[in-house]
Amino acid sequence: MGKPLTDRELHNLAMNIVGRELEAEGYDFMGVNSEPKKNPQFVCLKDKVLHFIVVRYVPHPKDPTVYDEALMAKMKDHANKHEARTYYAGVGLSNAENQDLPVYLNEAYIVDYRGLIEIEDE
């Protein structure tokens, strides 16, 4: 058995997964914040539009598309002041061999990431 990843390591892994996708889709990174409690994690520019992206690691069996609505409403207000679009990126991570076990360092894992979810004005 390897060493289970810490919450911090799982958060960083989730950020790397989202960051690679953003890079592949042509987003330019203006700011990256890897602190889980400091939001947004990514401030990006694409097509001259600012994007605020909140990244969360979501443990199995929780649904990675379900987000904290109060937090995201607050982020949306903040983004609106900057004429930015707001997104939530939930990344489910689980052990590939047994989803009830933790994700271990240097061992296979399953990613459940369904892309950016745009937070619209109410």
Image (cartoon, rainbow, N blue to C red):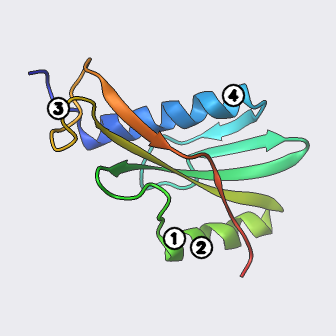
> Residue reaching furthest left?
1
In three-dimensional space, the C-alpha distance between marks 3 and 1, rounded to whole angstroms, equals 28 Å
| Quarter of the image that includes the N terminus | top left
**Element carrying mark 3:** loop
Residue type at the position of mark 3: Pro
Mark 1 highlights which residue? 71
The answer to whether mark 2 and mark 1 are in CB contact below 8 A is yes
Q: Position of residue 101 (x, y in %)?
A: 15, 39
Q: Residue at x 33, y 58 (%)?
A: 62
The mark lying in front, picked from 2 and 3, is 3
How packed is label 1: few (under 14 Cα within 10 Å), some, or many (20 or more)? few
Amino acid type, label 2: Lys
Indicate the amino acid at tag 4. Answer: Glu
User: Residue at the spot x=60%, y=74% of the render?
Assistant: 73
Estimate the spatial distance between the alpha carbons at disc 4 and disc 1, rounded to whole Å: 25 Å
Q: Which residue is mark 4?
A: 23
- Residue 22, percent from left and from top: 67, 34
Whether residue 14 sits left or right of residue 40 in the image: it is: left
Quadrant in the rendering for residue 47: top right
N-term mark: 2 or 3: 3
Q: Secondary structure at mark 4?
A: helix
